[in-house]
Image: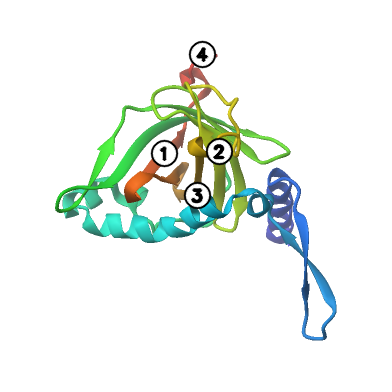
Amino acid sequence: MYRRILTLSLCALLAACGGRERAQVTLDATGAGVAEAQPVWKATITPEDSLRLNGLQASWTGLHGKLPPRVRVAQGKLVDPSAALDSPALTPGSYRCRVLRLRQATRAASVLASPSGYCHVDATDQGFAFVKQTGGDPAAGYLYPDGKRYVFLGARQSKPGDNSLGYGTDPARDLVGVAERVGGFRWRLAVPGDAGQVQIYELTPVPPDQQPKS
């Protein structure tokens, strides 16, 4: 009974963090109307970005299969598109971010890693707000619960720590992706890039005394 109550409480919390849901009416076997909740991100995402999001798994799987075996072993679950775990709930706070780029090389795929920076996650009424605080690849947006993953809708910012540019403001800077848990206190945010590339933000929580100064 305790586990059931806890599960229901967590589901209610995630639903609240996901923001409002919009009703969609379908017909059941008797022809009667049945209202179904539609996640906000599905009503917000553009058709072009929906295609990019839907194609992420195929592009990612193709790149992963072309990585040298030693690279796949070294990076492990972080770059494995099938490694997502249950219970993806993020904890609000600061995270250490390491950004990897999976890209097609001449004969095989490769991984290019950037130095670690910091990201921050806040729980809001609209969803989990994500912002890259330091380092390169500045991005900001919202993460919406979607089963074993979160769907990310955001934008490339002009500088680290900025979150002034929202999704849909400038389509050329829009970002979409999925965030998943891949280990104990370890998450990743995968974003499809140009020319079939995949950009992966590795997210690991950091203690308060190691967080960047605001």
Q: Earlier in the sequence, mark 2 or mark 1?
A: 2
Amino acid at circle 1: Tyr
Under tag 3, what secondary structure? strand
Q: Which residue is mark 2?
A: 154
- Cα distance, mark 4 to mark 3? 28 Å
Q: Residue furthest left?
A: 107
Q: Which residue is mark 3?
A: 178
- Cα distance, mark 2 to mark 1? 14 Å
Mark drawn on residue 46: none
Under tag 1, what secondary structure? strand
Mark drawn on residue 201: 1
For the residues labelled 4 and 3, say whether their Cβ atoms are less than 8 Å apart.
Answer: no
Which residue: 48% across, 49% down? 181
Rate crowding at label 2 as few (under 14), some (14 to 19) or many (20 or more) other CA atoms within 10 Å: many
Under tag 4, what secondary structure? loop
Closer to the observer: label 4 or label 2? Answer: 2
Q: Residue furthest bottom?
A: 30
Which residue: 23% across, 51% down? 73
Q: Position of residue 191 (x, y in %)?
A: 44, 45
- Cα distance, mark 3 to mark 1? 10 Å
Q: Position of residue 199 (x, y in %)?
A: 38, 42
Q: Which residue is mark 4?
A: 213
Q: Position of residue 158 (x, y in %)?
A: 48, 23
Amino acid at circle 3: Val
Closer to the observer: label 2 or label 1? Answer: 2
Q: Earlier in the sequence, mark 2 or mark 3?
A: 2
- Residue 208, relative to residue 66: is it above or below? above
Q: Is residue 168 left or right of residue 24?
A: left
Q: Earlier in the sequence, mark 4 or mark 2?
A: 2
Describe the colour scheme in one phrase: rainbow
Q: In the picture, which quadrant includes the N terminus?
A: bottom right
- Cα distance, mark 4 to mark 2? 24 Å
